[in-house]
Image (cartoon, rainbow, N blue to C red):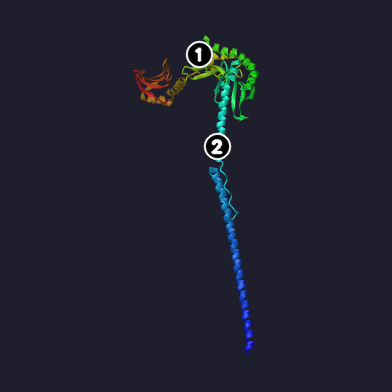
Amino acid sequence: MQKDKVRPRVLIILLACCLVGLLIFNIVTLNAVKKLGDSARETAAAVGNLDYTLQNMGEDLSDARNVLGLKINSYGSDLAQDAPEAPADDYAGYYSALDQLMSEFSESMLRKGCSYFMESRECLDLYRSFNLTPVQKGRDILLSSSGKLYYRLSILPYTTGGKVQFDTETFDKVSTARISTEKELSSFIEANQSRIQAHYADLEPVARKFDQYSKNPQLLSYLSGQKLYIKKRESEPLQTGYDIRRTDGSLLCSMMLDMVEGNITLGSKKCKDTDELWEDLLKLHTLFDIRTVSEKKTESKLEELSAMVKDPAFMAFLETKGFAIAPEPQESDESYDFPITDKGGFKIGTLSLEKDTGEVYLFDSDNVVVSSVKKN
């Protein structure tokens, strides 16, 4: 074959091979690019999930630090935002400083307000004009006359316009007002003084009856016979009365006059008037348990011993030994005695309950203590 014909064919074959090779290369390249794209998408998804998880963990951590009272830090994410957020300001120092300022101001105003209403010439002149005596108790100022409470001033924990204010009320809470000056207090007292004086005047005869009863010979004799005595209660602003006590000092009851409502009571019993109170005072032993603690203990122990000496098992125990015990006690001024005898009636000892102490002792035939029964 001629060379000039062979060369074009060779070129055509080479070109075809190049085209086939290029096609194969493109196919392989496209597959590789596709796999790379899929891998990139999977990586991006994984990174997104990781960022979401980290954000959730950060929120949970912030919640935990908030509960514990710790400072909360803010962390940015290059994957989620362009720039991190600035950390929140810490206001604790400001809160503390302001709290100190307000506390010191409140205490200063408290001292100023109480000092004004307790010591100023204007207020002291006002109290004297109404025969009132001021006494400070904490944040309260009590105004009394002849030992009877008339008014209560309670300082408020805040001010208005830089002025100290008091909630003021009458002793019976019938009238109230908010004051900050001596003139306002004066107006409040003037509006209520006559009513309060009339109220206490109405109760004065009842209070006198109480005093008369406490000294009445008939009542004193009765109380003595019941091993009781009467004693004036310590002064109280809203009630007055007397305590009735047992000889061991324990309280039996109190006869009281409520200075607000005017009620008369003997213990928990309400009396309609002083006449009913007098009748009840002369029968205290029917209204109350007048026994002392030791008397209650002794009577309880006596019941226990009386049941024991009649118990069939206890009686059988003594019988097997050839002895017996009296089923009823012999009472003396000091004790309850249960004699123990042999079959011939000879007294070998005594089971004795002491009245004053409630203790049980076992004596021999010569009245010498054999043992003490400590069980109570």
Task: Name which of mark 1 and mark 2 comes first in the sequence.
Answer: 2
Which quadrant, please, contains the N terminus?
bottom right
Type of residue at label 1?
Leu
Q: Is residue 11 above or below residue 100?
A: below
Q: How many marks?
A: 2
State the CA–CA distance, disc 1 to disc 2. Answer: 65 Å
Q: Give the quarter of the image for residue 174.
A: top right
For discs 1 and 2, the disc positioned in front in the rendered view: 2
Q: Is residue 177 above or below residue 69?
A: above
The answer to whether residue 269 is visible is no
Q: Residue at x 61, y 67 (%)?
A: 34
Q: Which residue is mark 1?
A: 223
Q: Residue at x 62, y 72 (%)?
A: 26
Q: Is residue 75 above or below residue 126?
A: below
Q: Residue at x 58, y 58 (%)?
A: 47
Where in the figure is residue 67, as x and y percent of width and height? 55, 43
Which quadrant, please, contains the C terminus?
top left
Q: For numbered disc 2, what is the local secondary structure?
A: helix
Type of residue at label 2?
Ala
- The numbered disc on residue 97 is 2
